[in-house]
Amino acid sequence: MQYPLVLSTIGILIGSLSACSGSIEGAAETAHGAVGGTIDAGDRVGSGGGATTTTGSTTSSTTVTGTGGGSGGAATTTAGGGSGGGATTSTTSGSGGGATTSTGSTTSSTTVTGAGGAGGGATTITGSTTSSTTVTGAGGAGGGPGVPPPVGCDPGVNKTYDVGDGKPYAKLGAVPWSTLGPGDTVRIFPKPGGYHEKFILSTRGADGAPIRVCGVAAADGSRPVIDGKDATTDAKAAFGGYMPLQDLGLITIARGAQAYGFRPGWIVIEGLVIQGANGGNTYTATTGAVRSYDSFAAGVNLNAGDHVTLRHCELRDDGNGLFSNSKHEVEGTLTREVLVEGNYFHDNGVVGSYSMHDAYTQALGIVYQYNRFGPLRPGAAGAALKDRSAGTVVRYNWIEGTVRMIDLVDAQDHAPDALADPRYHQTFVYGNVIISRTGDATRMVHYGGDTGGFEQNFRKGTLYFFGNTVISRHDLGDAWGVSVLYASTNDEAIDARDNVVSHVGSSHLWLMTDLGHLVLGTNWITSGWKDGSDKFAGTVTGAASVVGGADALLDPGTFHPLVGSPVIGTAGALAPEAAPYPVDSQYDGASGTPRPPLGVASDMGAFAGG
């Protein structure tokens, strides 16, 4: 491949999960690859949500029904072409407590009741989905950060492997991972001290019958912990003999010992705490040797796969919480259709390094939704979400406390495939809460690329940024200026509508940084903003549509509009390209509750008022 530091394929070695060398605001990023060298690092985000031209079917869908204090309201509809082919339709009713149903090629519908869950109402998701999980929680609608709720972890439609003290399988290593097939479920029960074991998923489930690895919550709601510190690896684990692959993950999804070109797929991982895969820890490999994790190690290392879902997990104390790669070699080395839903990422990264992140992904089709991204490890300088995918959708997430919040940059390992995918040139970021305080990002959302010498692979399209709530709290002692948006070149455009940008502090508020073309619709922005930095050489159109003032009247904790807020009932029209992506949900703590769809005369920002 014709971009820097990309490794050639080494015989029939395991498909490459690799790291990269790129730059963020001039700082070089380098990391070690799984195939014995280095390649450029980057973000990867998959497809989903909205009518997109993809292949396959949506990996999964989650329904959250709240009893008591649900948000209420009329039914709303979301049309979308999720991770796979064909549109996925989600119809949501705001009434509290109603029934939940799922139709389509769905493996199962399970219901779990958990105190303190999100409020909401009945949600029906129809489409070709891998699984549908309904979580019913007592308590009102959320609106702030939350730990993922328990998930349903019912027995599988095929074989079920129960792991834990007093269960048929006392250790994770006893599970026959290399023979798992469609409809098999591994249920992991809590145990004191957690599981200090590693494993690899190297086989395939099927549409409607995924391989599922799920945590069974304890009575107090706590979830099983998979801990990389001093972890052991079963000698029979199917890593294929290539040792560096073992250094790069706690839970690995890769072909392992399968033939070159085989790709694992239709896999769901949910309801677990995944921690301790970092360069400061050691583990015992399949050979019995004690080895150190690579500094680039991930809690979940997706080397290559398709229709993979990571849901309602907590990922912490890893190098990267999640890492996925996708390589332009054969179809089996590409990663396709990834769903990252309802997880809590925090305290990942490496001190002093820009190269490791809460989530770092490259895929053809990825959706991030309902996740909470908290601060990285103190002293780490990475991003919350870094992505190099085609078909990226980032919606309904809570993001705070990192050097860059959302970093959408150029494809690297799979650049020819991404550039050939029409989704690569349109990225959709909506319904998110993005919070930057003293010491956090001063360039919040980056769009374009960061691989020096390969500008031809930059996104060179349009970022559709709408219905977000952006919170900036910076003074001059911290930053001269704070940019909401940052385009890499003047070949990148950003369409921003119905956002709320609330800035408090003496720092200058810039909408853009130095380059790029910004198209504004109706937005509420704190008065005193400027088009861009003092070096801005791009363009801004539509400034007359912006409304603003001194105070958006948002709740200081949840950032919901208060009664009398100027963002209530003042939204304008969205771009026509955003029509397949209606903002009809809002983050409430690892899941979503319905809201009246964003549009003319509705409420601007990530939350509906009232």
Image (tube, rainbow, N blue to C red):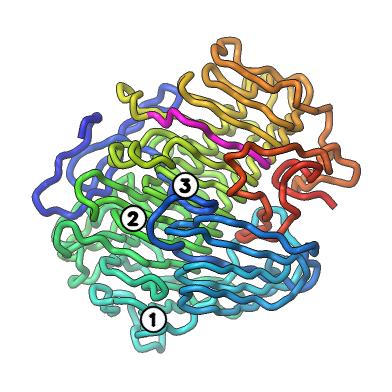
Residue 467: x and y, percent?
A: 68, 42
Q: Is residue 570 above or below residue 289?
A: above
Q: Is residue 558 above or below residue 450?
A: below
Q: Earlier in the sequence, mark 1 or mark 2?
A: 1
Disc 2: which residue: 302
Mark pair 3, 2: CA separation: 14 Å
Q: Quadrant of residue 115?
A: bottom right
The residue beneath circle 3 is 358
Most extreme residue toward the right, as rendered? 564
Spatial CA distance of label 1 from label 2 is 23 Å
Q: Is residue 390 left or right of residue 93?
A: left
Relative to 118, 79 lies left or right: left
Q: Position of residue 372 (x, y in %)?
A: 58, 52
Observer-side mark, 1 or 2, equals: 2
The image position of residue 428, as x and y in percent, is 54, 42
Q: The disc labelled 1 sits on which kind of residue?
A: Val
In the image, is residue 219 part of the stretch drawn in magenta? no
Residue 462 belongs to the span the image colors magenta? yes
Magenta range: 458-468
Q: Marks 3 and 1, how far apart in space?
A: 28 Å
Element marked by disc 2: strand
Q: Nearer the viewer, residue 507 or 526?
A: 526
Disc 3 residue type?
Asp
Q: Categorize mark 3 by other alpha carbons within 10 Å: few (<14), some (14-19), many (20+).
A: many
Dot label at residue 163:
1
Quarter of the image where one finds residue 208: bottom left
